[in-house]
Image (tube, rainbow, N blue to C red):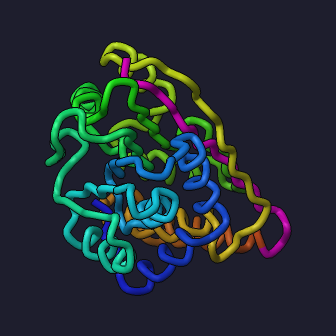
Amino acid sequence: MLTFNARTTKLLENAYQGADFSRRRRASFDALNPRPGETIADIGCGNGMLTLELARALGEEGRVIGIDPSEDMRTAAIERCADWSNTAFHDGTATTMPLESGSVDKAVSLQVFEYLDDLPGAVAEARRILKPGGRLVVGDMHWDTITWFSDDPERMRRMIVAWDGHLVERCIPAVLPPVLRDGGFVIDDVLPVPFSATGLHPDGLANMLIHLIEPYVVKKDQVPAEEARAWAEEQQALSDAGRFFFSITHFVISARKA
């Protein structure tokens, strides 16, 4: 489990509102195509940033329901959406949602499925809550697409392998579509959303990953603290010297309940 101190929490909040993460949310938002008056479930809503954007689009007659198992995240989401009466938040997971069958028009899940150990169960639960023809949008990274330059490629490999420990499935965009088809969905699109950077930016995806990966791999005893620190310092030095390069592709999967 990832744990955050106050400094890291502030950095994450900054990154979530930055250009990289805004573009990722916008890709899911556009694929969902929210319409005024619809009811939408935000599965794994986290701190409610996408929930709020959906609330604006749905209007007073619509409703967006955030589902998350973390009380801290739900509290943050409730505070963020406090001025929007068309939002509601519930304790639940992707495989167990406190919603009636056939009660929502659409559902969205952003960077959640890669942490699930029961993809068929999550697909079945999404199908249960959706109305006939309802749309499901799932956005996740394909971690096999990561390219990250280092003058010490073997150390970089060790860091990435250690970081993989925080995931259940690193290749959701590849493995989820057949699970969706088997679960009664029709796939409409699998849209790539590439990210690349030639320098570190305070609100960027790469900078956020560095601040998450270093403490995680040390805490899990996967990489010695000195090695992890040297890795992070090298990336900053590469950025300062104009030699930094990072790339990864996020995918947005759009499907309909058959």
From the top left corner, tell me how far across and down residue 230 is, in percent: 57, 70
Q: Is residue 112 above or below residue 229?
A: above
Q: Which residues are magenta?
A: 240-258
Residue 149 in view (yes/no): no
Q: Nearer the viewer, residue 57 or 213?
A: 57
Tell which of 75 and 130 is nearer to you. 130
Placement of 36 over or under 48, stated as above or below: above
List the single residue furthest toward the bottom: 6
Magenta-drawn stretch contains 256: yes
In front of the other: 15 or 167: 15
Q: Residue at x 51, y 31 (%)?
A: 254
Residue 14, given in percent of the width and then of the height, sits at 55, 77
Say if residue 38 shows up in the picture: yes
The answer to whether 238 appears left or right of 131 in the picture is: right
Residue 58 on image: x %, y %: 46, 56
Pinpoint residue 89: horizontal percent, then vertical percent. 24, 63
Q: Is residue 84 above or below residue 98?
A: below
Write down the quadrant of residue 64 in the picture: bottom left
Q: Does 223 appear in magenta?
A: no
